[in-house]
Image (spheres, rainbow, N blue to C red):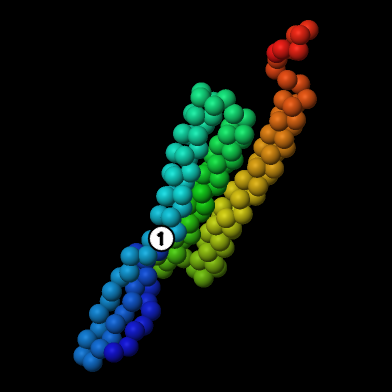
Amino acid sequence: MSLLNSSSEVPGEKALLIESPGKRDKVVSSTPSNVYLLNVAFYSFALFALGQMFVAVLIAKSQAMVGDSSAMVIDSLTYLFNSYAEKIKNKSLKESVDDTLSAAEKELRRLERTRQRLWLEILPPLCSVMTLIVLTIYIIIDALNSLTEPDYVVGEDGSP
């Protein structure tokens, strides 16, 4: 009996071919796809960030929690864009090649799909990093302002 790796028809799942004398069976493992994992990350981060934002704004009135929630929203949007990039990548791999196209036209289509996939894989994380840097600078400036300029006025007797 020998084991061979093979690709499955379902994107993201791996198949294992088991060969024994006179038999050849394919067993599909239940490994989740990248798209599925990225969608789980998106929904869990988004729901947690929105819940934390609700608590931060209405109950705790905490600048730190608002900043953390904002960063988590940015992270969840990055997961969403990466999930879309994975869908585009899987779609381009599954598309059937049109036999009426010339070799040059097929190559142009392949290059266009590759360019689109690269833009989707590079641009969202780059935007995420830049947005997180700007958000961090804003949070630090806001925190320093709240430390140097308190919201209350101190009375003559020293009480707020």
Q: How many marks?
A: 1
Is residue 45 visible in the rendered image? The answer is: yes
**Residue drawn at x 51%, y 70% as measured from the top left:** 103
The quarter of the displayed image where residue 95 is located: bottom left
Q: Can you see residue 100?
A: no
User: Residue beneath label 1, please?
Assistant: 33
The outermost residue toward the bottom is: 21
In the visual, does 13 lie left or right of 155? left
- Up-down relation of residue 105 to residue 157 (above or below): below
Amino acid type of the residue that numbered disc 1 sits on in the rendered structure: Ser
Name the quadrant of the C terminus: top right
Residue shown at the point (22%, 86%) measured from the top left: 23
Image vertical order of residue 115 relative to residue 52, above or below: below
Residue farthest left in this picture = 22
Residue 30 location in percent, x, y?
A: 33, 65
Instruction: Residue 134: give x, y in percent of width and height.
Output: 70, 39
